[in-house]
Image (spheres, rainbow, N blue to C red):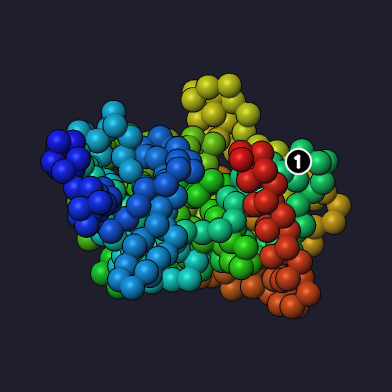
Amino acid sequence: MSDDVRDAFVPEAGLVPPPVREALLGGRYRLGEEWARGGMAYVFQGLLLGAAGFTRRVAIKRMLPALGDDPDFARLFVEEARVVTALSNPHIVEIIDLVYDEERRACIVMEWIDGVDLGTYRGLHARVGDSTKWPRIARVGLHTLRALAAAHERPEGPVFHRDVTPTNILLSTQGIAKLVDFGLARAGDRATMTSPGVVKGKLGYVAPELTAGQRPNAQTDLYALGVTLWEALAMRRAFDGKNAVELMVQAGKGGIPRLDTLRGDLPPELVSIVHQLCARDPAERFESARTAAKALAGLVDADLDDFQASVREVTLARDSLRSETG
């Protein structure tokens, strides 16, 4: 409606202009502020607007403009939505919808997780000179292994995450860890979507055999989780190479220090499980995520008081992060 036409509607004449329709993503999602940014996409807070005033907080993942017109990245984006919707597990972030923006670029709508990622959680502890509580890291490991088991054992074909890192494990204020960002995943029933010999993912978590050109599998995801848990307990990076080449060389050599030489409060069983997960030789790792989860389950305290303490700690971490970014 033009300004001239709108000016013709005056309250004195008993006429009011029709409401201006809000531009909604996909016709039903209100886009909020940017929450995070990765190598492929932005993540925004969003709001699903339904009938009768129904609303739901969501996360909306949009491709970076520089990649939005690349057909390969567009296929990866759509593939992520297709793959994750086939996985139903309480420890995998739910995909709600796939919509297109005004530029006809795909956007993934996901459940909103109120909390922090594991990397932020560890970083907040490090800043106050405090170590993470090992029972809570063990619980995070168990939840992530259950997510990986669901992906690896998908009836239609296995899905390998390929990017299990601290920023992709979200800790909710309900005490649940959830795995997110299957953007580099490859479903076993689809052709590979990456060029031969190209290693993707964050290099400090890439299994040594991948740098030698082998294909991703369940053991490569277990390795990445092992390094992630090691860092969460050791309160430091496993590899500190100054560039991609140094990181690849260090990861290829392995040699991560034993956790029990860095902390004296860790159960020997936990140390053994973490180091078996990130063993340099794939044959020395657990046979499967399910097998590793069974080994770790015995160490996770089901005591309600400890669970509630974990919930409070994540809530405090979330509030601390909000106060810094607000």
Q: Residues within 10 Å of mark 1 (few under 14, many from 20)?
A: some
Q: Camera-side residue: 136 or 212?
A: 136
Q: In the figure, 11 relative to 308: above or below?
A: above
Q: Provide residue 254's location: percent of width, then percent of height.
A: 60, 38
Residue beneath the point at 32% across and 67% down? 50
Q: In the figure, 101 relative to 47: above or below?
A: above
Residue beneath the point at 26% across and 69% down? 156
Q: Provide residue 289's location: percent of width, then percent of height.
A: 50, 65
Q: Which residue is mark 1?
A: 126
Can residue 300 be seen?
A: yes
Q: In the figure, 174 relative to 222: above or below?
A: below
Q: Camera-side residue: 87 or 32?
A: 32
Can residue 255 be seen?
A: no
Q: Quadrant of the C terminus?
A: top right
Q: Residue furthest right?
A: 264
**Left or right for 243, reference 296:** left
Q: Quadrant of the N terminus?
A: top left
Picture quadrant where residue 104 is located? top left
Amino acid carrying label 1: it is Ala
Q: Provide residue 231's location: percent of width, then percent of height.
A: 66, 45
Q: Provide residue 70's location: percent of width, then percent of height.
A: 21, 33
Residue beneath the point at 35% across and 52% down? 30
Q: Camera-side residue: 99 or 164?
A: 99
Picture quadrant where residue 270 is located? bottom right
Q: Which structural element holds mark 1?
A: helix
Residue beneath the point at 58% across and 31% down? 250
**Left or right for 172, reference 209:** right
**Left or right for 295, reference 289:** right
**Left or right for 151, reference 239:** left
